[in-house]
Amino acid sequence: MRRKDASTKRPVNLSLNAKVLDRARELGMNLSATVDALLAEEVRRRYWARWNQDNREAIAHYNARIAREGLPLARYRTFMKGDAPEGDA
């Protein structure tokens, strides 16, 4: 997914609620920056929702494997429960 700050800007026409638009202007809001940030967040949210949906089967298989076999490098963990000095756990 491309970062929004690496892209060029393109003018678009939007239809917005007139009362909300008037209030935003009264508050001195930068409409372009606000809409750009909110749209970027919504695109990011939907992108990952779709990615999770598209990959749900692979994720389920991976989770089942971890449940069955454990984490691949678990034996190298030094911070597991019981390893902390007394009073730190």
Image: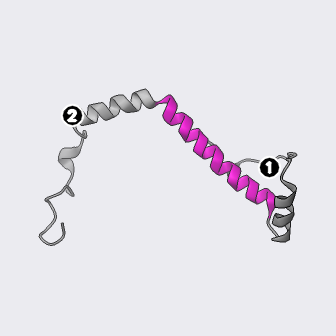
Q: Quadrant of the N terminus?
A: top right
Any part of residue 30 in sight: yes
User: SS at mark 1?
Assistant: loop
On screen, 79 above or below 45?
A: below
Residue drawn 60% across the image and 41% down it: 46
Q: Main secondary structure of the magenta part?
A: helix
- 13 falls in the magenta region: no
The answer to whether the residues at label 1 and label 2 have Cβ atoms under 8 Å apart is no
Judge left or right: residue 68 versus residue 35: left
Q: How is the image coloured?
A: one colour
Residue type at the position of mark 1: Lys
Mark closer to the observer (1, 2): 2
The location of residue 9, given as percent across then percent down, is: 80, 49
Q: Earlier in the sequence, mark 1 or mark 2?
A: 1
Q: Residues within 10 Å of mark 1 (few under 14, many from 20)?
A: few
Residue type at the position of mark 2: Glu
Residue drawn 85% across the image and 60% down it: 19
Judge left or right: residue 34 versus residue 50: right
- Say which residue label 2 marks: 69
Residue 9, label in figure: 1
Any part of residue 3 in sight: no
Residue 37, label in figure: none
The picture quadrant where one finds residue 63 is top left
Q: CA–CA distance between discs 1 and 2?
A: 49 Å
- 37 falls in the magenta region: yes
| Stretch of the chain drawn in magenta | 30-55
The location of residue 71, given as percent across then percent down, is: 25, 40
User: SS at mark 2?
Assistant: helix
On screen, 77 above or below 57?
A: below
On screen, 37 above or below 74?
A: below
Residue drawn 21% across the image and 34% down it: 69
